[in-house]
Image (cartoon, grey):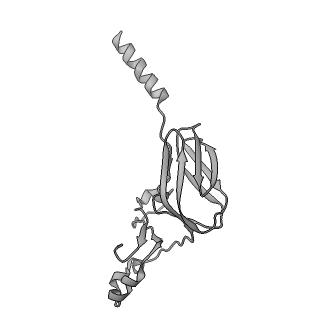
């Protein structure tokens, strides 16, 4: 009798278990989102879960399908900082989100050159402070196939450009 009771409880727990709503790894505290274009925001949740996203006075809702969800907000003007809120079975808040220009840079080893390595680093680094410029560095990860998502490369949180940031 006990094994049937234990199995029944395990089956009941598995049937009622829900995955928490999650954002893609690109959406972290300190993120910068592209201005003046429709803004997709996406993540994962339990299939059928209703997900509500709020940012800068806009709200959009989606229902997760096959564990994935996505909303598209209307274009935003440059500004911030904002709080990005995502609600499903749980609530997430991403803080210090800016809207502005997003630039993607890639290249060879010369792209790893930092300002602290420059000949004039002693004067250039102290003069470079701008907390509204963010650096989102994805570690090098050579692959034969395109990555499905930037999260595969384990990106770090964006860094504000200050003389102390490295």
Residue at 45%, 57% (x, y): give it.
151
Query: Relative to residue 128, is residue 14 depicted above or below?
Result: above
| Residue 147 seen in the figure | no
Image x and y of residue 3, in percent = 35, 14
For the residue pair 19 and 28, the one nearer the viewer reads as 28
User: Residue at 58% of width from left, 43% of height from top?
Assistant: 51
Q: Nearer the viewer, residue 10 or 121?
A: 121
Q: Residue 123: x and y, percent?
A: 35, 88
With 41 as the anchor, is 9 left or right in this view? left
Name the quadrant of the N terminus: top left
In percent of the image, x 39 and y 77: which residue is there?
A: 112
Whether 33 is drawn above or below 19: the answer is below
User: Does residue 49 appear in the picture of this structure?
Assistant: yes
Task: Give above or below for 147 relative to 140.
Answer: above
Indicate the position of residue 113 as horizontal and vertical percent values: 38, 80
Farthest bottom residue in view: 119
The C terminus lies in quadrant: bottom left
Q: Residue furthest top?
A: 1
* Residue at 45% from the left image edge and 59% from the top image edge: 29
The picture places residue 27, in percent across and down from the top left corner, at: 50, 57
* Most foreground residue, 18 or 132: 132
Above or below, 161 relative to 86:
below
Q: How many marks?
A: 0
Hey, which quadrant is residue 109 in on the image? bottom left
């Amino acid at each position: 009798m006990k094994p049937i009771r234990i199995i029944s409880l395990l089956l009941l727990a598995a049937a009622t278990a829900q995955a928490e709503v999650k954002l893609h790894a690109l959406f972290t505290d300190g993120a910068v989102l592209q201005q003046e274009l429709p803004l997709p925001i996406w993540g994962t949740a339990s299939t059928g879960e209703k997900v509500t996203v709020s940012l800068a006075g806009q709200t959009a809702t989606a229902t997760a399908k096959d564990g994935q969800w996505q909303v598209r907000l209307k274009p935003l003007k440059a500004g911030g900082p904002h709080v990005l809120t995502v609600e499903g079975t749980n609530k997430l808040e991403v803080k210090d989100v800016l809207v502005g220009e997003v630039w993607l840079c890639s290249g060879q080893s010369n792209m790893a050159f930092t300002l602290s390595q420059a000949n004039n680093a002693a004067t250039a680094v102290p003069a470079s402070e701008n907390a509204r410029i963010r650096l989102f560095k994805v570690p090098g990860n050579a692959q034969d196939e395109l990555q499905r998502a930037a999260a595969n490369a384990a990106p770090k949180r964006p860094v504000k450009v200050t003389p102390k940031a490295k």
